[in-house]
Image: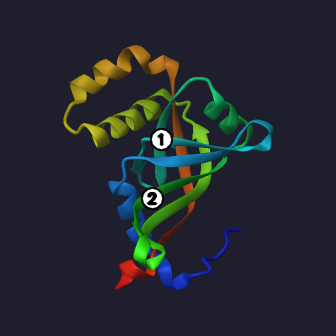
Amino acid sequence: MFRDMRRKKQQLGEDECLAIIDTATSGVLSLIGDGGYPYGVPLSFVRVGKTLVFHSAAEGHKIDAVKANPKASFTIVAQDVVVPSEYNTHFRSVIAFGQVRIVEDRNEKMALLRALGEHYWPGHDDELAAEIGPRFDRMHVLAFEIEHLTGKQSLALMQ
């Protein structure tokens, strides 16, 4: 179902891809949006096992797109250094493919929000609870189940 990477020499292993995901602070979620046009939206996230977690307003383009078609990709650019003298860039990136669902179970939703909060501000459970509490019913949590993961880096970074 998913294509093999053409330039296998530059391919990152799954552990390297997961390490990039775990140290990144944001990426771009790509969905099929209005009129069949691609819709890419930058988001903060956390990985919990093989799931990427995002929070969202309860309505809008992103939610409409997920409801219409849950298939998605999520792209992280971990490094992108232009090297003019080489007419090249030294890059590392990861793309995850999978399906997104809106988390309906309240306990799962709270657990994933706590994981997201802990990722960005560890050890501040009380502050997180105060932030989530009044907004809980007006927000969605999106769970992106990773089905396929691929990563690539420039040849220059392999030396």
Along the viewing direction, whichever of 59 and 152 lies nearer the viewer: 152
The percent position of residue 79, horizontal first and vertical second, equals 39, 63
Q: Is residue 46 left or right of residue 69?
A: left
Circle 2 packing at 10 Å, graded few (<14), some (14-19), many (20+), is some
The disc label shown at residue 43, or none:
1
- Residue at (40% x, 57% y) in the render: 21
Q: Amino acid at mark 1?
A: Leu
* Residue 13 position within the rendered picture, expressed as x and y whole percent measured from the top left: 44, 75
Indicate the secondary structure of the residue bearing disc 1: strand
Asked if 146 appears above or below 103 in the picture, the reply is below
Quadrant position of residue 18: bottom left
Quarter of the image that includes the C terminus: bottom left
- Residue in front for this viewpoint, 7 or 49: 7
Query: Image height check: is 57 above or below 159?
Result: above
Task: Identify the residue at the far left of this view.
Answer: 123
Q: Which residue is mark 2?
A: 77
Q: Nearer the viewer, mark 2 or mark 1?
A: 2
Q: Vertical placement of 21 versus 16: above or below?
A: above
Can you name the residue that lies furthest to the right here? 35
75, above or below 3, in the image: above
Tell me the distance, in whole angstroms, between the alpha carbons under discs 2 and 1.
13 Å
Where is residue 110 drawn, in percent x and y?
40, 30
Q: Identify which residue is drawn at 39% across, 81% down.
A: 156
Q: Secondary structure at mark 2?
A: strand
- Percent from the top left, x then y, of residue 107? 44, 30
Of callouts 2 and 1, the N-terminal one = 1
Q: Nearer the viewer, residue 78 or 64?
A: 78
**Which numbered tag is attached to residue 120?**
none
Res 157 quadrant in image: bottom left
Residue displayed at 34% across by 34% down: 114
Mark 1 residue crowding within 10 angstroms, few (<14) / some (14–19) / many (20+): some
Kindly identify the amino acid type of the residue bearing the numbered disc 2. Answer: Val
